[in-house]
Image: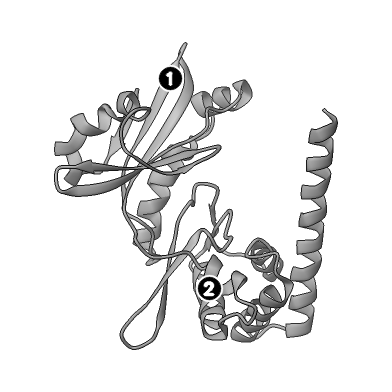
Amino acid sequence: MQILIQPKYQSAFEFVSNLPEKFGTEGETIYASRNVVKRFKNDDKEWIVKRYKTPNLIQRLAYTFWRKSKAKRAFLYAHKLESIGIDTPEGIACIECKKYRLFHTGYFISGVCHYPPLYPLLVKEEAFDKRAASALAAFFVSMHQKGFFHGDPNLSNILYHIDEAGKYHFTVIDTNRSTFKASASPKECLENLKRITHRRDLLQYITEEYASLRGWDIAQSTKQVMDALGKFEKRKRNKRFYKKLF
């Protein structure tokens, strides 16, 4: 077992090292699907612990010898994001467990963020909140200009709160599939927007706001994002179809 832990939390090393053993029977389950997310209490602190699905053999080989695991990436990216001024729950530790000398299971431990996700605010309402959508477009401009490209920027992975002045602030979660780029082309930036939502009127509005802020052609930018979304959805449908066959 390998553990990476923030130096200031070194006193919690024993608690962290016991999490793989405790995870199945302790903690409050927040989410349980492919990955499992639980809330744990350590003294007077609340921490979120995410256990990633055990990867297949090829992935286990990759995570053992060539590639950082999802848990390690989540931990390292939390600190990277903090350093460039993008809000995300504090990365506290990560755990990598091995079986037969190969990577087996990863855990990421973070601080708690109580802000709600954007999904209900922007997708479920028939008339979406344009102020929030405009603020989100500006947030994506800021992220891209800082070189951060969220790997799955759907609206459940972006949390928000409104300060006393009425300004929107955003927090990103589930960042392990993200990338950092020193520079990116307009095509790469617009391609990243396609994952925000499948709701087309909302995505069109966000794209128009984004393109306007960047000084890009609005109609051309919108067409590129909508075309990218269509191709993305088609790939997903084909993938589901072939899964049913095999």
Number of numbered discs visible in the structure rendering: 2
- Give the mark toward the camera: 2 or 1: 2
> Relative to the observer, which residue lies in front, 89 or 202?
202
| Residue appearing at x 40%, y 23% in the figure | 97
Q: Is residue 38 above or below residue 226?
A: above
**Labelled disc at residue 121:** 2
Q: CA distance from mark 2 to mark 1?
A: 41 Å
**Few, some or many residues within 10 Å of mark 2 (<14, 14–19, 20+):** some
Q: Is residue 127 above or below residue 142?
A: below
Q: What is the quadrant of the C terminus in the image? A: top right
| Residue 86 point in image, percent of width and height | 40, 65
**Few, some or many residues within 10 Å of mark 1 (<14, 14–19, 20+):** some
> Relative to the observer, which residue lies in front, 228 or 162?
162
| Residue 82 point in image, percent of width and height | 35, 60
Which of the two discs, 2 and 1, labels the residue nearer the N terminus?
A: 1
The amino acid at mark 2 is: Leu
| Residue 211 point in image, percent of width and height | 66, 81
Task: Say which element carries label 1.
Answer: strand
Q: Find the residue positioned furthest to the bottom.
A: 165
* Residue position marked by numbered label 1 in the rendering: 98
